[in-house]
Every structure is written in structure tokens, then in C-alpha cells.
Image (cartoon, coloured by chain):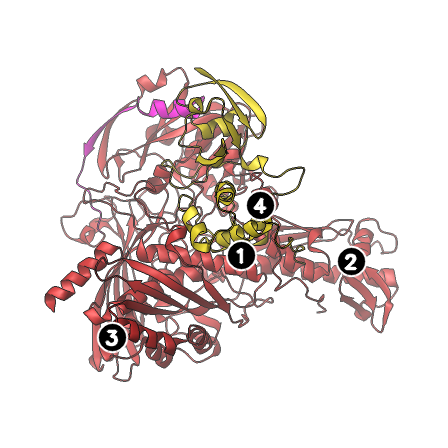
Chain colours: A yellow, B red
Amino acid sequence: MARVSIRINGVLHEADVEPRLLLVHFIRDVAGLTGTNIGCDTSQCGACTVIMNGRAAKSCTFLAVQCDGAEILTIEGLAKDGQLHPIQQAFWEKHGLQCGYCTPGMIMTAYHFLQMNPNPTEEEIRHALEGNICRCTGYHNIVKAIQYAAELMRGGAPAPTPAD
Amino acid sequence: MVQAPERLIGAEVKRKEDPRLITGQGTYVDNLKFVGTAYLAILRSPYAHARIKRIDASRARVHPKVLAVFTGEDLRRDGIGSIPVGWLLPDIKLPPHYPLAVDKARYVGDGVAAVVAEDRYSAYDALSLIEVEYEPLPAVVDQEAATRPGAPQVHDEAPNNICFKFAMVAGDVNRALAEADGVVRQRIINHRTSGSSVEPRAAVALYQPATGELTLYNTNQNPHLIRLLLALTMNYPEHKIRVIAPDVGGGFGTKIYLYPDEVVACYAAMKLGRPVKWVETRSEYLRATVHGRDHITDFEVAYKRDGTITGLKVTTYANLGAYISPFAPLIPTFLYVPMLHGPYKLPNVSAEVYGVFTNTTPVDATRGAGRPEATYLLERMVDLVARELNMDPADVRRKNVLEPFENYQTPLAFVYDSGNYPATLNRALELVDYARLREEQRRLREQGRYIGIGLSTYVEVTGAAPSQVAVSLGAQAGLFESAIVRVHPTGKVTVFTGSHTHGQGHETTFAQAIADEFGISIDDVEVVHGDTDAIPFGLGTYGSRSTPVGLTAAYIAGQRIIEKATKIAAHLLEAAEADIVFEGGRFFVRGAPERAVTFQEVALEAYVPRKIPADLELGLEATAFFNPSNFVFPFGTHVAVVEVDPETGQVKLLRYLAVDDVGRVINPMVVDGQVHGGVVHGIGQALWEQVVYDEQGNLLTGTWLDYAMPKAPDLPSFQTDRLETPSPVNPLGVKGAGETGTIASTPAVVNAVLDALAPFGVKHIDMPLTPERVWRALQAARGQG
């Protein structure tokens, strides 16, 4: 067993873990944050993507012990004071999700991507999603959502009122 | 019947289910935590076919974290039976399918033992401590080869591995072939794919020994069906079982069935008296969750010089895999053969289908289920005829599509409910500017660039019904759907539906329709689904049935509520019932709209009676079981534009247009989303996805490293358009929209690639059209040239 402390969404989680414990299982089973999903065993699907020390990371590709001292942001930490993050808002507005299972990974991938590239083209967005698999949406509305999120984050058009 | 003004039907309402899903609060099965949970892992056969000579679990049993190890013998001894088949055909062979293999393993992935341990990691550790002595047996993978004399036998009960034979005939095909101006013969392979929801399967089973209650939380599309199959398999009383399908991370057909693993989880929970959780890994999903398609088909098509198609003769070998998955017999029969008439006048069709056992993962419905196979065959057929006649494929379609109709009796059993095929075809050609596209294609060819334009003109069948006919044809379950609509004292409404949503958005679309029906706010309507203790007996979601069957049931229950509410309103307003008008959420006296009570006031009166007489039953709630009189038949035309690099064989999808008619649309945003996802599912089969076995039955595509899922950079954005021809089958005029994209897109893309390759003389390539396959076809064509 090894002692690790990992800060997730601002809260420090300390535990004795098996050296083989995957970060994603630390997040889900030790910290109890189940918003981060698991979709494959081989780091193809990106459902488990979180932000680690400022960068998007597939949490199934890290051991918890490798992440001792890391700062992690998961989907649960994105909305602040009950206000959705613009990316969450955009996924809702643009119907960027159906079953929702890949969505936390998509949103966290977009979070890092839009920080690096606040004004992306469609092609750049599609390239950024190379490591995230969605079976429901055909990616069309995910791309539209990320374009719209970029607009919102640049202080563009205010969010339209909910459809009636 | 008076109707509330419609404000919500047809509107792009943002989804009610999204706030929890975009904030990480989804209730997917693996997210559920119960005190004392133990973890189940399944040991799976590494051989496609092997006799199990001995299982020694002694080392696993002494692992400090292991609670129990079970084998197939243990389950049989405790009375766990075979998983039932949900659709029977004449002379079908029904070998047993035990939840854990007994004596023989029949595919790579067949469960042979189960471990329950204190935690996930220990359960997997213990699997490697179980010693199984196998005697490998010869395996068969190819379903046509499996029927030949001397082929390895998967089950003793099925000689030559034939599970069933199915045939249908319309008209006189042999005469059509003899009298044709030309005949095209082609073998086409509709290869095996995986539904591949991003959430694999998962289960948590809980057992209360004191009451005998067994609760199964499970990733499934139809909790009552799972409960029924579980009761029959475990020989356990149905009313003591509760099945809950909470948030489900995609189904695509693969979560319709009761699987062995869920049965083992329930058995283990009962044996141990502890909650037992089982979560599938992706590599398990690809081995142990049903696959789709897998047809080998030979066809002959008869045509006249002017492009009229007069006859189609089909022989199909459908691979069923190692066991009969519960609805497998339905897919290559009633959901495939009658659809070989397609959207065409085609008067003569004959088809013969062999359902064949092989040493592979079982095959059942995945998105489209039978209709993609029929549509792919028909659309390739039309393009092959066009090629022979040197005609434009659009002209051949114009010549052969049915004229607009209502209730058209096809020569192959089905009565198409409503359709206007020329309208969607013409609309698609107009939107892509077909003539200009062809001109551009000609111009680019002169520059050595190869653009292809592919059409797919389809009709498909959704909302399967009526129950009595289905049962007479072999169904072991009805095809109705149920709903309870409960109006609470404050006028808020809960809709309990037998349909299940796992991405389709029913929590929103059903609420839109019911809020409109009552003239109330959508915020006042909640949709509950997925729990056998909450909802009426329902059949769940598959075959694009939720809107035409499930929503219709809720709508009919709503009409019953309005009928009763009108009586209550009459008492409140002291007017005759016949004089009460219901509009915009208000009941008023005809001619005196100021004499009114609101829907909410009527609801309160139903529970807190002030004026209604004692002989009027209290409460405001209605149940409906809707058993449709017919299926509904969505249709449309899709167009794909690709560019093929003749040096590398690389296909690039440049443009995609979908023109669909799914009847009346409740939420266009949701329907567009269904189309986008469906289209990509079908493109995936056309270009990338394939489940591959070697000749010994080893699965070569056992992870998403090898099974090529479509990804964002490989795809364009899509153009969608719709026409709305209402269905006469249900009061809302709706059809189903969940599978049209998948059904239409595969042939559109393949036709586009072969259109691009026309100058090289390449007529057909079997999918997936990977660069290697395209390149090889070009090399072969060049060699011949």
C-alpha cells in the first residue's frame, strides 16, 4: 500500500492505495466522484478524461501513485455556485449529448482545448476530439457545442433564453 | 375531441435530462453504491470450441478476498435453467443456453466460471487462479461453411448447424428472370459489427432473504422483459423481482437481452446475501455482448432495358453465433425478408434465409436490425442495374419508386402505412444540386480526381405491431406499450412509461406532447421510466418504437384524463358536460369563455372534492395499453459525396445529406441528433468497423484499438432535411426516428465509393471499404484492364 494525496476539485483526498490502483478508480471509488466514466480498457474512448495540473488527461492511463500531489478537476468541479460552465451550457443548448456517458470526457477535453485555442476552426475542434469516442451524436452537435462554447467564453453572444 | 393549442410539439425544447448528465450526476449502474457490495468477474473461454474436462477452483477459493467461485454445474444444480428464446420459428432448433457453460465452451468469451470477491481487483486476480482443462475442438466461423457436410458441429441438436430456415415468395421470380432484358448476379457480404455503446454492460443484484425480493439494477433497454426472462431462467416468481434500468449509456440494441452475466450476478447475490456488482470491461463487451449483421447473400436481379426492376431472388446465410440470443430469430427473418420489397414497385421477390450456428459471439439486433441488411442489398442492387444499363442511379430510382400512397399492401406481407418516396428523392436531389454535382464530378475526373456520389432511397419499419399477429408468427412477448398518466392534486403530472430512454430524450419529448395535451407548462410534467416497481408492464425501447407506440400510450391515457376532467369541470361550472370546452389548459362553457376552471383547479377537485357528487370516482389518473393496428414506415433519401484517392485507396467523406420523413416530429433538435448519430453508425460499417475472427475463431478485434469506431476528425458535418407525411396508424401521426440514419447511410457511402471507382471498372467491393480493400480492387481492375 502507498499513501497518496490528490486534490480533486479543490478538496484534498488522502488514502493508502494499492500501487496498481488506476487514477480513475481513485477518483470514482476512493473520492466517490462518479461523474468520470470508464468506457474502454485501452485508453481509446476518453470517457475518463479529467484535467490534471491544467492539462486534459485520460485518468485510466495513470496510476493513482503517479498522481501524488496532483491537482485534478473533474466534471463535478466545473459548475461554480450553481452556474454551469459555458461548455456545459453549450452542450445543453446545442444538444451535444444523448446518453451522456461520453459527455464528461468530451467536456473536459474541450475545457483544455479551448484554453489553448480560444477561437478554433471546425477542423481544429474535430482534431481535438480524436481521443474521445461518442456513439450517439455522430459528433456533429458536439462540434457545434464547442464552437458555441468558444463564442460564449470569448464573451460573444449571451446565452439565448431556454426554448419554450 | 377538443385539443389544447399546440405550443410544444414541433419545438426545439432543450432536454430535461441534460442538467444531471452535463454535471456528472448520471445514475449509470457502476455509479451506484450499496453497503457491503461484492464484485463479480467471469472467466471466459479462450477457445472458440472446447470440451471443458475439469475446473479446479481450489486456489481461487483460498484467495483471502474471494467469497465464492461458481461453475455451470453449480448453477444447474441450483435449478438455474437456460435463457429462453423470445421469438420461435417453425422447426427452429433450440439448444440450451446456460448462463455458464456446461461440458462445452462454444465461443471465445463463453463464460465458464464466476468469481465473487471483496473488490474488483481481487475478483480479476482470482480468475487467473482458476485452472480449466480444455480439450480444444475444431471450430467453425463462416456460416456458409458451417452448413457443409463435415463441418464442426456447434450443437448436437442442430444438424449441419442450421437453426432455422425461413422463406417468403411474392409473384414469380423465375419467370421475371427468364423474361428479363438483363440479369445481375452478385454475392454481397454484410459483415459483422458491434453495437458498441460507450457504456459497457453492468449489473448490481440485491437480495432480501427475509422477503425474497430480488432487485437487479441493470444497463438495459426494457426492464420488464429482463424481469420476465430472469424469472423464467431462474425459475423465480416474477412479482418478487424488481429490475431497474437507471441512466443507461447507450444501447443500440445490445442491451435488449437477458445475458448470462446478469443471471450469474442475481444467483451470486442470492447465494451470498450481499449486493453483487458486475461491470463489463470493453474487451469483454466485444466478446460477450451480441454482435450485429453478419449476412452472406447471393442475389439475382431481373431488369428491363428502360431500368424497370422486375424481380429479385435472394439466398442469405445469417450467422447466429454460438447460441440463440433472445430475439435473434426475428432479425434475419421478419425484419429482413419483407423489407426486400423496399420503396420500389418490385413485383416479384423470393428469399430464402438460413439461420446458422457458428463458434462466434451470438448475433442479435443492433441499430437497424434486419432493415440495414435489406436496404444495403436493395440499394447496391439498384446501383448495379444502373451500371449495367449505363443509366444514372437517380433515374433508375425515379423509375422504380412507388407513387405516393396511404396503406399500400406490398406483395411481401407488410402494409406500408403512408409514404411519398418521389418527394424525398426529389428533395434530396434538389438540395445537393444533383446535376451540378455530376458536372463537377466530370470536370474533376478530367483532372485525375475521383469524386463519387451515392444515393440511398430507403423505407424501413418501426413500431412493430400488432401483438396478436406477432404472437401468431412466433413472438413470445406482445408488442404493445403502456403508460400511466397521474395528475397530482396540484395539477402537476407524472407520466410513467413502459418505454426506456438511453439517449433518445423521452424525458423531454414525452413531456412536450403531454404538456401540450393538457395545456400546461413542460416544467409541470415529469417522465418516469425504467423501474418495474414504478411503471406499468411495458416492453421498453428498441426498433424505434418509443414515439409511435410508447408516447401514443401516454397520449391515450391523457385523453382518458381529459374525458374525466371534463365531467369534473361540468360539476364545478354547473353546466352540462356536453357544453364544456377544453382549450389551453382551461375548461369553459361553450359560448361563455369567462365561465372557466383551470386544469389545476379540476385536479384539486378530483382529490379534495367540494362539488363533485359521490358517484363520480375520485382521483385523476389513467392507464393505457396501446397495441397499434400496424407498423409504421419511415422513409427518405440520403446522398453521400466522397473522394477516393486511387493511389492509396483512401476514402474521404466530403458531404452528407439526409432527407427523412419520420411522420410528425415532436422535437426537431432531438430527431436531427438521432439522424446524425445513426448516419455515423452506418458510415462506420461502410468504411471502418468490422468484427474479425481468424479461422480458429479467435477474436482479432477484441478492443477499441482494433475495432475501428468512427471518430470526429474522419467525418464532416451533416445536412439534414425533413418532410412530414403523418402516419395514419396513431393519433399523433408519428413514426420512429432512431434507426433511419444507420439504415440509409451504409449503402449511400458504399454506392458513392463505387461511383467514384466507375472509371476503373470496379463494380463491387465488400465492406468495410478500407484503403487496403479499395486499393486491392483497383489493382485487380487495372490487372484485368
Position in image of residue B464 (x %, y %): 47, 61
Kindly identify which residue carries mark 3.
B387
Tell me the chain of label 4.
A
Given residues B517 and B322, the one toward you in this image is: B517
Q: Say which chain tag 2 marks.
A: B
Instruction: Kindly state the secondary structure of the residue where label 1 is placed.
Output: helix
Question: Chain for mark 1?
Answer: B
Amino acid at circle 3:
Arg
Which kind of residue does numbered mark 4 sit on?
Gln
Residue at image point 78% right, 58% down: B599
Q: Is residue B704 above or below residue B735?
A: above
Label 2: which secondary element: helix
- Residue at image mark 4: A88
Question: Mark 1 near mark 4, Cβ–Cβ under 8 Å?
Answer: no
Q: CA distance from mark 1 to mark 3?
A: 40 Å
Mark 2: which amino acid? Phe
Residue at image mark 2: B599
Using the numbered discs, state the Cα–Cα distance from disc 2 to disc 1 in whole angstroms.
27 Å
